[in-house]
Image: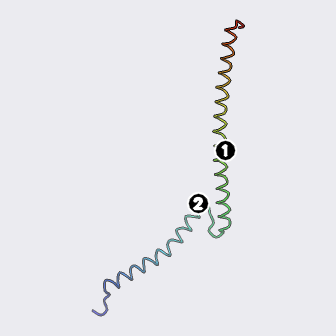
Amino acid sequence: MGDLLSRDEAARIAEDAADRAVRKAVPDAIREALVRVGLDPDHPQEMQADAQWTRQQRTRCQAAGARAWVTTVAIVVAATAALLIDGMVSRVRAILGGG
């Protein structure tokens, strides 16, 4: 029985093997995922520049969306005010007999 491993020894060996397999597989998986989305992991400065450009585009689009919303509200308010004023002017003219 001297050649057999104890349960604890077998568990430790299995855990060490799993740990080594994960440590090898994770970098490969990350590299593959980066390549699939069009990033080159061999050029981290370019990846960082791409991320900064993407962030700038996102913030510009968000700002443009906010400006578009404010512009739309302003147009609706201005049109409503113009219709209200036109209606009031027409009513006053009708009352005064001018038209």
The residue furthest bottom is: 2
Residue drawn at x 68%, y 65% as measured from the top left = 46
Compared with 91, 45 (above or below) is below
- The part of the image, by quadrant, that contains residue 39 is bottom right
Q: Which of 60 and 38 is in front in this view?
A: 60
Say which label, 2 or 1, has the lower sequence index: 2
In the figure, is residue 76 to the left or right of 27? right
Residue 85 position within the rendered picture, expressed as x and y whole percent measured from the top left: 68, 20
Rendered-image quadrant of the N terminus: bottom left
Give how far across and how far down residue 20 sits, in percent.
46, 78
- Residue lying at 63% horizontally and 66% vertically, measured from the top left: 40
Q: Is mark 2 on a helix, strand or loop?
A: loop
The residue labelled by disc 1 is: 64
Identified by mark 1, the residue type is Ala
Instruction: Give residue 56's quadrant in the image.
Output: bottom right
Compared with 21, 50 (above or below) is above
Task: Report the colour scheme.
Answer: rainbow
Residue occupied by mark 2 = 37
| In the foreground, 81 or 53 | 81
Total labels: the figure holds 2
Which labelled disc corresponds to residue 8? none
The location of residue 22, given as percent across then percent down, is 47, 74
Q: Is mark 1 on a helix, strand or loop?
A: helix
At 65% across and 68% down in the image, what residue appears?
A: 44
Q: Residue at x 54, y 72 (%)?
A: 27
Q: Which residue lies furthest to the top in this view?
A: 97
Name above or below for residue 41 compared with residue 16.
above
For the C terminus, the image quarter is top right
Residue flagged by tag 2: what amino acid is it?
Val
